[in-house]
Image (tube, rainbow, N blue to C red):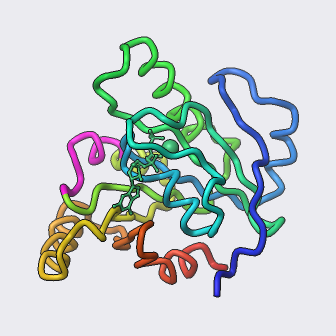
Amino acid sequence: MSPIKSAQLFISIGTSKVLPNSDLDAKKYPLFAFFGRSNVGKSSFINSITGVKDLCRSGASPGVTKTVNLFLINNKILFADLPGYGYAKMSIPERKKLEDLIFWYLGNPENNFNQVFLLVDGKIGAQPSDLEVLQFLNQKQLPTTIVATKFDRLKSSEKARALKKITNQIRNHNVIPYSSVTGEGRQEVYKTLGI
Ligand SMILES: Nc1nc2c(ncn2[C@@H]2O[C@H](COP(=O)(O)OP(=O)(O)OP(=O)(O)O)[C@@H](O)[C@H]2O)c(=O)[nH]1
Ligand SMILES: [Mg+2]
């Protein structure tokens, strides 16, 4: 059974400069952020762990999420669905705007992250941009868990090797293999969330 009983949109933050006033209330709640390259499966991951299919907008083309969307879970904790980085086909100004927003949000000392989940593609492994971002998270000393997404796309015989590749790329952080399609990895995520 899912330990998540309720999930609702709390606030969307779309500018890198000014926080809406209601963000003041956000500080009351433990905060978990979901971060990763565009199209890696962040929004699908949140929908899957909350069991609410359309909570976050997800889609086949990269660049779907364009604001930082906070969701209140069980009236107790906040999930932040972030836009992705590294989408080559977006115009440079638009990409810069999104990247400014996510790095500002993650780097803002007022946001007291309980945990940041860095999602990397389970099949292709961590990309150079993921490793750069991990350095940023390490420098900021943000507690980080890695999620290897889309694990259903791997054959059972390929899974162990794919996981090993990622754990070798990313040392000192726990790596959770996950599939939003099958729910593989869900229990471990709940454990990490402490719910
Ligand atoms: N097979 C499979 N496909 C997935 C999984 N998770 C996400 N996808 C697909 O990957 C695509 C991108 O998913 P999103 O959840 O929108 O990805 P995102 O990281 O939020 O993307 P942006 O908001 O654009 O940064 C969609 O077509 C999803 O259906 C998964 O676990 N398995
Ligand atoms: Mg998204």
Relative to 17, say whether 30 is above or below. below
Residue at the farthest bottom position: 1
The C terminus: image quadrant: bottom right
In this rendering, position of residue 136 left or right of residue 151: right
**Predominant SS along the magenta part:** helix
Relative to 162, say whether 83 is above or below. above
Relative to 14, say whether 106 is above or below. below
The answer to which image quadrant residue 4 occupies is bottom right
Residue pictured at 65% horizontal, 56% vertical: 79
- The residue segment tinted magenta is 124-133
Give how far across and how far down residue 158 sits, in percent: 13, 75
Give how far across and how far down residue 141 sits, in percent: 48, 53
In this rendering, position of residue 55 left or right of residue 98: right
Give how far across and how far down residue 151 sits, in percent: 30, 69
In this figure, what is the number of numbered marks? 0
Relative to 106, say whether 143 is above or below. below
In this rendering, position of residue 53 left or right of residue 174: right
Using the image as rendered, state which of residue 157 and residue 137 is in the foreground: 157
**Residue 52 part of the magenta-drawn span:** no
In this rendering, position of residue 182 left or right of residue 22: left
Residue pictured at 37% horizontal, 73% vertical: 176
The N terminus: image quadrant: bottom right
Residue pictured at 77% horizontal, 41% vertical: 11
Give how far across and how far down residue 118 sits, in percent: 42, 55
Residue pictured at 55% horizontal, 38% vertical: 107
